[in-house]
Image: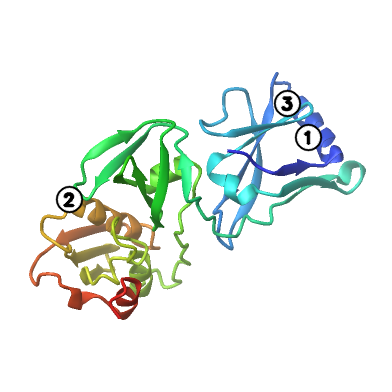
Amino acid sequence: MNINAQVTPQARDYLIAILAKQEVPGMAARVYVEKGGTQQAETCLAFCPPGHEATGDLRQDFDELTLYFEAASVPYLEDMEIGLQGEGKLQSLTIKAPHSKKPAKPPKTFVLSESCEALRVPSGASTTLPEGAPVSITQALGGSFTVKYEGNLYRLSPEVTRRLGFHSDAILFEPPEDGRISEQQCWDALRLVYDPEIPVNVVGLGLIYKLDFDQDKHFVRVEMTLTSPGCGMGDIIAGDVKDKLLQVPWVEDASVDIVFDPPWSYDSLDEEARLELGLI
């Protein structure tokens, strides 16, 4: 993994002087993006003592200056530039990261930079994909990836994809001022949960039967189904549903009940899902 980043000579010398004042041999700086891919994205620069860089961080040297770039932030830091403005005691660094607020698109193929926990699709069996494995992405939705390796499909969780340096397409919600859970935000969050084999979210598939809210306890109960009772990914999908709901403002807990009455059928698909699957 590489990154196209520039540091002006003035900014480089300024940073080297600041790092030297810390009186820590080998002191470097670390660059990362908070809330990358959203309108709230902020590019940050922090001290990074020796040994404090994270696994997977990308190191780049600018003469005597060493910068570490957070792996998960690399897609948002392409073409970034660190400069210097002002004079004398009024000098300050400037950071221009033109892609920080743009959703990052994963490549079609890549090589695993580390061994990764994965789930075989559709059985749900747990396995580990080896470091150096060449994989191709068949689906990258809702933060998780479905990848093909040696002819088989595997699901990589959002936690694993972030560790590999990719960010999800998750959205950030503004907390309602009345302190109550927004039903619309809950439905929007559930539209970020996808079947690992089908590029359609669980709402579009018609898997979500009912949402119940306890505003006093900040609790959401979900009643949902699966495309078939034998779906090996059922617990994983249900877990994704709960995880996404817990990202909604004012939701403190959630439960997911899987039911099969009434049974799911293609009649449950919404129009967008039918169009995606070529049924209309």
Q: Which mark is residue 247?
A: none
Q: Give the mark count.
A: 3
Return the x and y of residue 277 as percentages of the image width and height: 31, 71
Q: CA distance from mark 2 to mark 1?
A: 53 Å
The answer to whether any part of residue 131 appears in the image is yes
The amino acid beneath tag 1 is Leu
The answer to whether any part of residue 180 appears in the image is no
The residue at the point 84 percent across, 33 percent down is 13
In the shown orientation, is residue 14 left or right of residue 19? Answer: right
The amino acid beneath tag 3 is Gln
The residue most toward the top is: 25
Please report whichever mark, 1 or 3, sits nearer to the chain's N-terminal start: 1
Return the x and y of residue 224 as percentages of the image width and height: 18, 65
- Secondary element type, mark 2: loop
The residue at the point 85 percent across, 38 percent down is 9
In the shown orientation, is residue 231 left or right of residue 99? Answer: left
The residue at the point 76 percent across, 43 percent down is 6
For residue 40, which quarter of the picture? Answer: bottom right
Q: Which residue is mark 1?
A: 15
For residue 15, which quarter of the picture? Answer: top right
The residue most toward the right is: 88
Query: 71 or 246: which is nearer to us?
Result: 71
Q: Which mark is residue 22?
A: 3
- Secondary element type, mark 3: loop
- Secondary element type, mark 1: helix
Q: CA distance from mark 3 to mark 2?
A: 54 Å
Q: Which residue is mark 2?
A: 232
